[in-house]
Amino acid sequence: MTSQGNQETSGRWNMRKRDLGVSLWIAFLSASVGTFILFGLIDPSEIENAWMQEWEVSRKLAYSIGFGFLFLVCYLSSWLTCFMIRTGPRRGHASGQGRRPPPEIRDPSERNPDLDLEDLK
């Protein structure tokens, strides 16, 4: 018999998988809304006329490139947010616990006897 305490519950994701899923879902929703707004304001056929080179860019390709770019930007920002939340300061930091003491201010002439303080004035 195996003990229940040592086995991971099936169907539960660990924190890294949850962060990845949340980042992907937020990026997908944000890129979808961004694509609707972007192509609601800009017609893809106008983008084709603005190219310097003669490339054949269909509407579907323009939509795909726009969504892909927005998805990549949104994914990177949501992943960075998850990373910063997980690696942020520990508990008690906001209430002043765990802070470093302020640095000790010393006279510069103590470390460098050749320093002439008259030159600094």
Image (tube, rainbow, N blue to C red):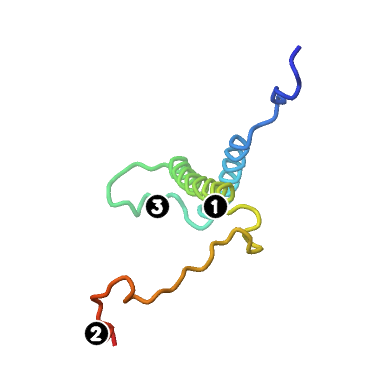
Circle 2 residue: 119
Q: Position of residue 57 (x, y in %)?
A: 38, 43
Rendered-image quadrant of the C terminus: bottom left
Q: Residue at x 72, y 26 (%)?
A: 9
Toward the viewer: 11 or 86?
86
Residue sitting at x 58%, y 36%: 16
Residue 117 percent location from the top left of the image:
28, 83
CA gap, disc 1 and disc 2? 59 Å
Q: Is residue 72 left or right of residue 93?
A: left
* Discs 2/3, front: 2
| Residue 47, numbered circle | 3
Q: How many marks?
A: 3
Residue 34 — which label?
A: 1
**Amino acid type, label 2:** Asp
Picture residue at 35% right of the left edge, 41% below the top: 56
> For the residues marked 2 and 3, what is the alpha-carbon distance in whole angstroms?
62 Å
* Residue 31 visible at all: no
Number of residues whose C-alpha sits closer than 10 Å to that of mark 1, classed few (under 14), some (14–19) or many (20 or more) = some
Mark 1 or mark 2, earlier in chain: 1
Relative depth, front residue between 114 and 8: 114
